[in-house]
Amino acid sequence: MKENMTPKQIVEYLDGYIIGQSEAKKAVAIALRNRYRRMKLDKEVQDEITPKNILMIGSTGVGKTEIARRMAKMMGLPFVKVEASKYTEVGFVGRDVESMVRDLVLASVNLVENEHRQKAQAEINDYIIEKITKKLLPPLPQGASESKQNEYDISFAKMKQKVLKGEVDELKIEIEISKKAQVGDDNLPPDMIKVQESIFKVLNVTNDKVKKEVSVKEAKEALMYEATESVLDSEAIRAEGLKRAESNGVIFIDEIDKVAVGSKDSSRQDPSKEGVQRDLLPIVEGSVVNTKYGQIKTDYILFIAAGAFHFSKPSDLIPELQGRFPLRVELDSLNEESLYKILTQTKSSLLRQYQLLLDTENIRLEFSDEAIREIAKLSHSANERTEDIGARRLHTTIERVLEEISFDIDTYQGKEVTITAEMVKERLGDVVENVDLARYIL
């Protein structure tokens, strides 16, 4: 976990994946650094300092979600993205908004479990090898002579090495495989989750074992779950996951503008939308939420809300909720130059992805600089003429340019194909010019 990265280092990292949007990057970087600063203070002062939540304003496809997701991944933080609009789907106040906190705790526990699994990988592998070797060489009966026991120990060590090196992978053995624990619905209230778990225990769902005859190679995979459960301390993982979600968790609430009631809206007091906002308030402000792993305080979770606000304004949110997002950053719409840089300067460039995909078919794909410029120009033009979907337009345009090559691989296998500006114009020019057609194809 790179929790001690400076704001400048965080922004430099994000620059490798997201073009522009420096204000949003700075706001996120400072918010993360403030967490690190808070942890270095005395406990009494720590309790008084809460994160400054961020509201991002910008059209779709300009990098709002990507900034938060990349940042959380880089720093190993528990992170979940939720859509504010889904909480209006059921009844007046929609789905239980506390479920976003339960999702965060689950993501945090999974994150911690993966870290522990990586650290204990050697121990897990040793457990599997030991169990398989015992199946190939059953232990001697009690009362065996010391010399026999010594011979067995030598043979066991040799067989263990053979299993480890894969020399006996084709041999068949009979093993008992533990059924993976039945997973209930994590979004149910905690009391209901406990009832679910009790029913599973009564029905003996979690402790069933199945006998199977498999090859040694298959047994190595089949015993992985049992070995992990045996080696790792589940209680410690749950406790650490809960603690990390509470102190380092990030919840990204997208489409927050969809629950704002615009001033032009005839139904100003929309109970569904305002109900969701009022339900969000205590969680963002700080409250205790019950989860199946225990209680979690939401006071120190960083909330990042985002929305396009085409048909409403941030001031259309209820005042109490506005006050919970003191930092506001506006993201710029992407121009032609930005789209060109996204294709050429980002680490996970779309062009690079398509080159690697077609390389598996023995087709070497190249793009001339003029072709890349043309793709950026036509994508920007399509955004202006129809709906502005930002960088997502590039997926559509590139896919259309490469459609024929991706389909007719027999013709192009073993060849180097260079995409030129003329080819791009030929595939996209007419479609972009015809607005009605562009609405359906691009």
Image (cartoon, rainbow, N blue to C red):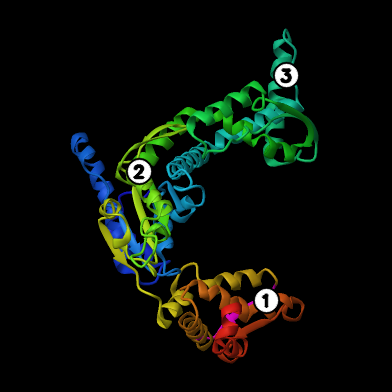
Res. 233 visible in picture = no
Amino acid type for the residue under numbered disc 3:
Pro
Q: Which residue is mark 2?
A: 283
Q: Position of residue 104 (x, y in %)?
A: 44, 44
- In depth, the one of 334 and 40 nearer the eye is 334
Q: Earlier in the sequence, mark 1 or mark 2?
A: 2
Task: Characterize the local packing of mark 2: few (<14), some (14-19) or many (20 or more) Cα atoms within 10 angstroms.
Answer: many
Disc 3 versus disc 1: nearer the observer: 1
Q: Tag 2, which secondary structure?
A: helix
Vertical comparison of 192 with 97: above or below: above
| Residue farthest to the top, as pictured | 143
Q: Which mark is residue 139?
A: 3
Vertical comparison of 371 with 357: above or below: below
Residue 107 horizontal side relative to residue 426, left or right = left
Q: What residue is drawn where x is 51% and y is 89%?
A: 370
Q: Position of residue 177 (x, y in %)?
A: 71, 30
